[in-house]
Amino acid sequence: MKRRKKLSPPPCVPAIATDAILESISDGVFTIDRNWRILSFNRAAEQITGVAREDAVGRRCSDVFRASMCETECALRHTMESGAALVNKTTFIVTAEGKRIPISVSTALLRDRHGRVVGGAETFRDLTLIEELRKEIKGRFQVGDIVSHSPAMRRILEVLPRIAESESTVLVQGETGTGKELVARAIHGLSSRRDGPFVAVNCGALPDTLLESELFGYKAGAFTGATRDKPGRFALARGGTLFLDEIAEVSPALQVRLLRVLQERQFEPLGGTRAENTNARVVAATHRDLAAQVQSGAFRQDLYYRIKVVKLELPPLRRRREDIPFLIQHYIALFNAVRNKQVSGVSPDAMGVLLAHDYPGNVRELQNIIEHALVLLGEGQIELGHLPSELVPVARPSLGEGNMSDAVKAAESQAIRQALARHRGNRVAAAQALGMHRSTLFRKTRALGIAPPGRDGRTRR
Amino acid sequence: MKAALTIWEGRISPVFDVSREALILTVENGVVTSRHSESIEAPAPAAKIERLLTLGIATLVCGAISAPLQHALSVRGVKVIAFVAGEIDEVVAGFLAGRLPTEALSMPGCCRERKRFRGRRDREGGGGGGRRRGRR
């Protein structure tokens, strides 16, 4: 039998080749000596950390790398003490701009030609792109109870965790039904106060004097009938979040008191003689344009600036129509579960009407429309006949015996009317928005008996 | 005035977001009148901020810090001197002398020089082989 030839050691890779390889790869690599000083730092390491090689070499690795694991779970320390390599341990680093970058880290021992340990090598990979792709593949952003696919909402949902982490006062502006309270609840749920109370007060629902006693509480004997101390919402929200809805409706006198609480973190209950402390985080919301309220003198400027440390503007549903089909599915699933129904979805005609509607009541209105349909329907698809009558005003088929042709006409008529309204009577723009040729639109408006717009939409005046 | 310096192994802790201990200095007329360490370990960064506020801290000297936390501290009235690196005694001396932030006690890539790494393409096109530096 032929003896296997003894393997010769691999030829030594010249140092210049090693350098070229390290420079060409997209993973960051650095090596350290036994005193945690950086010996080498490749091009990708410069790019990921934002630190130039000449600044990094010779410095302590923790000052250069700035990873969340440095203090307690240093991967290189583990490897140098145990001799065992670590693979793909995830952590984050903080750049000079204060940005957190998610990374995965692998480590190995660095030995000299005699096999003695002289330090360690760390390889790290930027996971930012992977994180983003993961979200893209998942196809939607969900924070708390807020579900959205729209870029406008996505921007808000992306920053929400960071806003929640801070203790800043937040102002949420948006039309009615856009989910202001959901955002406030999400901020509370993502913050370190999540185990504390979430206390909501609608400032527009209570008369001024009642609101004052609700917010600040009262002491026994403060007024007739006040037989016992009653803690206010600021006291109840200690260690938690206080949500002040419809903040624009607060009277000027109460605005002054609110300002004092926000500035000094102290308040006095009605009839009380001593100020009490509050550490409640305040999230305020309004459907009004608060900056315009300030300009008109209806809202105090100093209070405005105190509450809008962080400002979030929630887009109305008509500006994020891509969310409508997903919200419909979300609410069908929700009401199926709550009401024990088996509704499978929405017919194309009904979907056409739902997509064309402008939703002045925003997500809440859509939610009510789906709830309305599920009251009428036990299983199967939501048809035009299951939608509220104001959505399908023309040629609305009667429930259960609807003729398909009538249903299509009704949906077409509704879509055309709303497209014309949105484009202020400009038929060419409306036809483009509806994805049809203008002559098709003209023919359909005549056939469906839709009156021509009162003015020619092409003229600007 | 009270100042907190986040510490680890006798140096400024590398990342404030996950730091666990702070050296608390009470400074009157530029002289340290008391000095002790406190745990600032907290389950969430927001709780760490609350802890510093409870301790009455007016100035925080720390290593790297993520922008939302720095913003949250500034809003609550705490002066933040961030991206500081070095042995604690050196940093305390620099702080008392009003020299922070200074390049000698800063993390690489931070502080006044604000060097920014530019891509290889920039360098290759630059001629002379030297690295260009951007000033922000």
Image (cartoon, coloured by chain):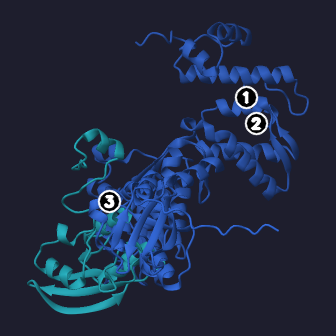
Chain colours: A blue, B cyan
Pointer 2 indicates a residue of which chain? A
Picture residue at 76% right of the left edge, 44% below the top = A372
Q: Mark 3 points at which residue?
A: A51
Residue B65 visible to an observer of this rendering? no
Q: Nearer the viewer, residue A234 or A326?
A: A326
Q: Earlier in the sequence, mark 2 or mark 1?
A: 2
- The reply to whether the C-beta atoms of the residues labelled 2 and 1 are less than 8 Å apart is yes
Q: In this view, does B32 lie to the left or right of A143?
A: left
Picture residue at 49% right of the left edge, 63% below the top = A12
Q: Residue furthest right?
A: A401
Question: Where in the figure is residue A258, as x and y percent of width and height?
Answer: 34, 65
Type of amino acid at the residue the image marks with label 1: Val
The kind of secondary structure element at disc 1 is loop
Picture residue at 84% right of the left edge, 39% below the top = A381
Pointer 3 indicates a residue of which chain? A
Q: Name the residue under label 1.
A: A392
The kind of secondary structure element at disc 3 is loop
Question: Where in the figure is residue A246, as x and y percent of width and height?
Answer: 46, 54
Question: Where in the figure is residue A238, as x and y percent of width and height?
Answer: 45, 77
Type of amino acid at the residue the image marks with label 3: Val
Give the Cα distance between marks 3 and 1. Answer: 62 Å
Q: Name the residue under label 2.
A: A387
Quadrant of image for the N terminus of chain B = bottom left
